[in-house]
Image (cartoon, rainbow, N blue to C red):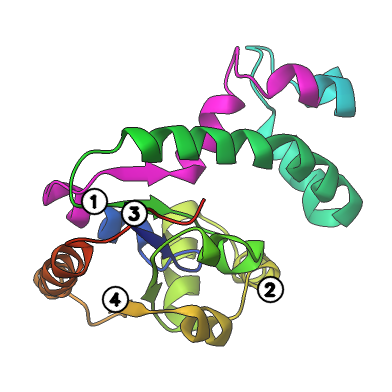
Amino acid sequence: MFSIGLTGGIGSGKSTVADLFAARGVPLIDTDLIAHQITAPGGVAMPLIASEFGDNFIAEDGSLDRAKMRGLVFADDTAKARLEHIVHPLIRAETERQRLAAQGAYHIVVVPLLVESGEWAARVSRVLVVDCPVETQIARVMRRNGFTREQVLAIIAKQASREARLAAADDIVINDETATHDALAQQVDALHARYLSLSSGYGEPIA
């Protein structure tokens, strides 16, 4: 099935663009949402995480203590790799299950770290990047999350650069500080029409 990998840096507006596609009837598969589901109370990843990291990283309700884990993996690349070794296969399995069940001419997989993963570009038909200047990212995340500029810059530094994302893109949605909702909708409409055309007679996606 024809599939689009949607990505972008923090604060780029991935969710807004994804919602615009969903409003046009396009099935969305959100890997961040899947990650939250498998680390929620009773989630399939939780026994493995508890075994690997200890109960100190489990919240009272049985979910992942995200703040504590975020602090650990942000400072320790080895811990980050250990966590990814647990959750990434589970996310991939659930993503593939949802892709096989998706209806419609094409579907969109929202993958925040698509470029960083090094593998997703081969698993989708096209890569769609939501792009904006770094200063716009910083301002949005500071306003949305209440982070300091230094905190946002530290997150951005852990992600692929803007240049690397654009180099990986087949298609781009511009969502800079001047972009209105109508302007975004027009870009999505044009891409939606293009994807419908490209999906006609398209073979099976790469597994």
Mark 4 and mark 2: span between their CA atoms?
A: 22 Å
| Near-viewer residue (196 or 16) | 196
Where does the magenta region start and end?
Answer: 20-49
Residue denoted by label 4: 173
State the image coordinates of residue 17 (x, y, percent, origin top left): 27, 61
Real-space Cα separation, disc 4 to disc 1, in angstroms: 13 Å
Three-letter amino acid code at the position of disc 2? Ala
Asked if the residue under mark 1 is in contact with the one under mark 3, i.e. CB atoms within 8 Å, the reply is yes
Question: Residue at position x 32%, y 58% from top?
Answer: 203
Q: Say if mark 3 contacts mark 4, CB within 8 Å.
A: no
Would you name the residue on which mark 1 appears? Answer: 19
- The residue tagged 2 is 157
| Residue 33 drawn above or below residue 114 | above
Tag 3 residue? 15
- Mark 4 Cα within 10 Å, few/some/many (few <14, many 20+)? many
Camera-nearest label, 2 or 1:
1
Q: Does the magenta run of residues contain 101?
A: no
